[in-house]
Amino acid sequence: MDLERISKDVETIVTEISESGHIKAGEQFVIGCSTSEIAGERIGTSGSEEIAAVLFEAFQRLKEETGAALIFQCCEHLNRALVMERSTMKEHGYEQVSAIPVPKAGGSMASYAYKRLEDPVLAETVQAEVGIDIGDTLIGMHLKRVAVPLRFSQKSVGHAHLNTARTRLRLIGGERAVYKQPQVEAECD
């Protein structure tokens, strides 16, 4: 396990996401992560809180730079529940569920985040604006509709495949619908 490479990979993607302008202050950023996949193993087999620590530090920087609320997805053993600050849960009206993630039931990343957040809680579901999936952990159920993939130069973290997405408003209507405000030109007197 090459923690230096993992740190470099995650720092690169965090910088790219931060500089992209796709996250606005107050938006929710879901993080799905398999530390096993990052280490080059099969998902759910070799979790690592050492890897989780490296990732958590980088995502904290993303939070500081963008003002996003971080939300960490648990593994399937907790039905992909989500770890977040209590203030985020309350602000968005999510319902708290009862569990404490541990590496073998929740995953190393969610377990690590739960221990490091100020006032951590779990919710069963969220509707986030932006997300990252490291190791094919399937975060799509926690994104608002409509998800749009984001493409960055960083394609992996360690050995794990990387996907990022943002959401946009649904376009409703038919052929007569207008989706952008017309530009109003200033009149001269």
Image: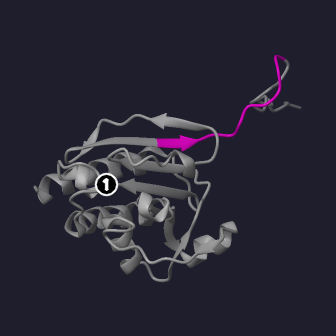
Is 36 positioned to the left or the right of 150 in the image?
A: left
**As rendered, which of 182 and 141 lies closer to the eye?**
141
- Does 172 appear in magenta? yes
* Percent position of residue 114, x then y: 41, 76
Give the prevailing secondary structure in the magenta stretch. Answer: loop
Q: Amino acid at mark 1?
A: Ser
SS of the residue under disc 1: loop
Residue 67 spot, x, y in % from top left? 51, 63
Q: In the rendered structure, which segment of residues is drawn in magenta?
A: 165-175
Residue at the extreme top of the image, as rendered: 175
Q: Residue furthest right?
A: 189
Quadrant of residue 26 within the rendered picture: bottom right
What residue is shown with label 1?
Answer: 34
Scheme of image coloration: one colour
Q: Is residue 126 left or right of residue 36?
A: right
**Residue 169, located in which quarter of the rendered image?**
top right
Q: Is residue 54 left or right of residue 56?
A: left
Q: Nearer the viewer, residue 182 or 143?
A: 143
Q: Residue at x 36, y 44 (%)?
A: 136
Q: Quarter holding the C terminus?
A: top right
The residue at the point 79 percent across, 31 percent down is 172
In the image, residue 156 lies at what x, y percent?
A: 26, 42
Q: Is residue 13 above or below residue 46?
A: above
> Which residue occupies 35% across, 55% down?
33
Above or below — where is 105 with respect to 22? below
